[in-house]
């Protein structure tokens, strides 16, 4: 054996509950993320934003993610302390994100200094940056800890917990208003109490769940990770931030191919998150386009939260069967079929006759969402060098953030000028984009797909 190498061992198989514990933090992250997705648009509209400008404010999310995630991934690859290499980062992100959740619906308190709309947008950016600091290391942690045959299960458990957190986070304003009688309306320029209290609960859940993972998960040491890798230790670069650019220039072929799939997928998701509330309020509830403070509009916003909860519930349930489906038909075909169902779901929103019927399209959207959160990462991880797992997971986020930034720039003007402020057409366009993504995934090279490997063995050994 060469002196440059350490003997390679297989990563041990972890129990279901060990994988569960390392993923619980994602429940809290998605709880806060769901509150943001379902309520940020109406909070910003409450503070004075119109539908044309909503997507511009939402650019804060992907822009901060594009900057933050590769940097966090790069430094977490090189970090080791008493808490490990990934845990210090998602703990710090959780603390900052929880504070931002508390302040976001209270932006009007600082109106004497800055208009609340800009305060809200600034807090949204801080919330997004903090969430990204917490989120990126969780993806790398699963890839660090699990052998190849357990990766799909690991990312699927993450998806299930994401779904659970998102269901409760999306439904909470509706529950507070309809079950506990907390006010769902407020004077113009103020956020209703049911939304404010939901954000307070979200902050508490966020930090509690991340602490669960921090305290109940032990990471492998750098020496152990070297034993699990066939890469010579001396080949691990010690460069600074410029190394991120060098790594970006050498991204694996599979990541480039997945980039196209991610572009169409996340362009569609961004449209859904930004425009579903105004689309449902106007197209289905019959509210006026500029009607933002009425009971009708608030009812539409609360029902959108319920619908978002449904698609997240579906994604959580679907996550438990994704490993079985992928084990039979392969990861690419599983992802493609899932995206097709999501595209059909988004397009069908245009045709639903009443708010209750919106729950049916959410089933297809939930299937797509569950697959988007797990299958691309499961496909990608097998093509990445272990010592670069964090930085490449962060760089992969470019293919999530860039389409959102592009949509954020052009989406609002398209709705305003081409769709005559009818946001429902943005959802139809999003459905078409998911169908394009479903076609694109067929051409991705998934080298270590267990189904493909089994076929290859049968060809070799008969």
Image: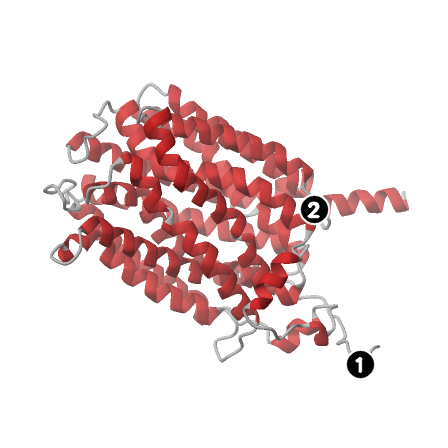
Q: Earlier in the sequence, mark 1 or mark 2?
A: 1
Kindly identify which numbered label has been placed on residue 446.
2
Instruction: Judge by depth and name the residue closer to the eye, 136 or 204.
Output: 136
Label 1 and label 2: CA atoms lie apart by 32 Å
Figure check: 351 above or below 232: above
Corner quadrant of residue 362: top left
Crowdedness near tag 1: few (<14), some (14–19) or many (≥20) residues, C-alpha within 10 Å: few
Q: Quadrant of the N terminus?
A: bottom right
Say whether residue 182 is visible: yes
Q: Secondary structure at mark 1?
A: loop
Q: Position of residue 330 (x, y in %)?
A: 68, 41
Instruction: Judge by depth and name the residue closer to the eye, 48 or 147.
Output: 48
Q: Residue at (43%, 65%) from the top-left corner?
A: 90
Name the side, left or right, on which 335 lies relative to 54: right
Q: Position of residue 18 (x, y in %)?
A: 53, 63
Q: Position of residue 435 (x, y in %)?
A: 55, 30
Figure check: 311 above or below 133: above
In the picture of the structure, the residue carrying the numbered disc 1 is: 3
Name the side, left or right, on which 253 lies relative to 59: right
Q: Secondary structure at mark 2?
A: loop
Q: Quadrant of the C terminus?
A: top right
Q: Position of residue 413 (x, y in %)?
A: 35, 33
Figure check: 317 above or below 244: above
């Amino acid at each position: 054996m060469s002196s440059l190498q350490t003997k390679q061992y297989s990563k041990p198989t972890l129990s279901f509950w060990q994988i569960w514990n390392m993923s619980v933090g994602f429940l809290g992250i998605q709880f806060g993320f769901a509150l943001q997705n379902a309520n940020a648009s109406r909070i910003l509209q409450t503070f004075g934003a119109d539908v044309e400008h909503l997507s511009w404010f939402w650019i804060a999310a992907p822009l901060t993610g594009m900057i933050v995630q590769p940097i966090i991934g790069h430094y977490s690859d090189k970090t080791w302390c008493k808490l490990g290499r990934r845990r210090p980062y998602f703990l710090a992100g959780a603390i900052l994100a929880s504070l931002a959740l508390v302040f976001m619906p209270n932006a009007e308190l600082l109106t004497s200094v800055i208009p609340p709309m800009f305060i809200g947008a600034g807090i949204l950016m801080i919330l997004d940056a903090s969430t990204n600091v917490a989120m990126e290391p969780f993806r790398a942690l699963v890839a660090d800890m699990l052998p190849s045959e357990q990766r799909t299960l690991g990312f699927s458990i993450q998806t299930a917990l994401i779904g659970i957190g998102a269901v409760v986070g999306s439904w909470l304003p509706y529950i507070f208003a309809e079950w506990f009688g907390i006010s769902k309306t407020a004077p113009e320029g103020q956020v209703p109490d049911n939304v404010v209290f939901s954000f307070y609960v979200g902050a508490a859940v966020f930090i509690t769940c991340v602490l669960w993972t921090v305290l109940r998960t032990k990471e492998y040491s750098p020496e152990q990770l070297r034993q699990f890798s066939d890469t010579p230790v001396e080949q691990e670069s010690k460069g600074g931030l410029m190394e991120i650019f060098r790594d970006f220039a050498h991204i694996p072929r599979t990541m480039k191919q997945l980039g196209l799939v991610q572009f169409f997928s996340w362009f569609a998701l961004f449209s859904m998150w930004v425009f579903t509330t105004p689309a449902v309020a106007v197209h289905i509830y019959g509210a006026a386009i500029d009607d933002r403070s009425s009971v009708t509009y608030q009812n539409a916003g609360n029902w959108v939260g319920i619908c978002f909860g449904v698609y997240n519930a579906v994604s959580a349930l679907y996550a438990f069967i994704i490993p079985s489906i992928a084990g039979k038909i392969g990861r690419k075909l599983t992802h493609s079929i899932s995206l097709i169902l999501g595209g059909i779901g988004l397009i069908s929103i245009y045709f639903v006759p009443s708010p209750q019927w919106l729950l049916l399209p959410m089933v297809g959207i939930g299937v797509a969402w569950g697959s988007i959160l797990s299958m691309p990462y499961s496909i990608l991880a097998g093509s990445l060098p272990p010592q670069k797992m964090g930085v490449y997971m962060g760089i992969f986020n470019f293919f999530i953030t860039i389409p959102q930034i592009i949509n954020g720039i052009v989406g609002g003007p398209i709705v305003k000028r081409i769709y005559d402020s009818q946001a429902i057409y943005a959802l139809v366009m999003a459905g078409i984009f998911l169908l394009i993504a479903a076609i694109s995934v067929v051409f991705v090279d998934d080298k270590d797909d267990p189904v493909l490997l089994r076929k290859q063995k049968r060809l070799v050994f008969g």
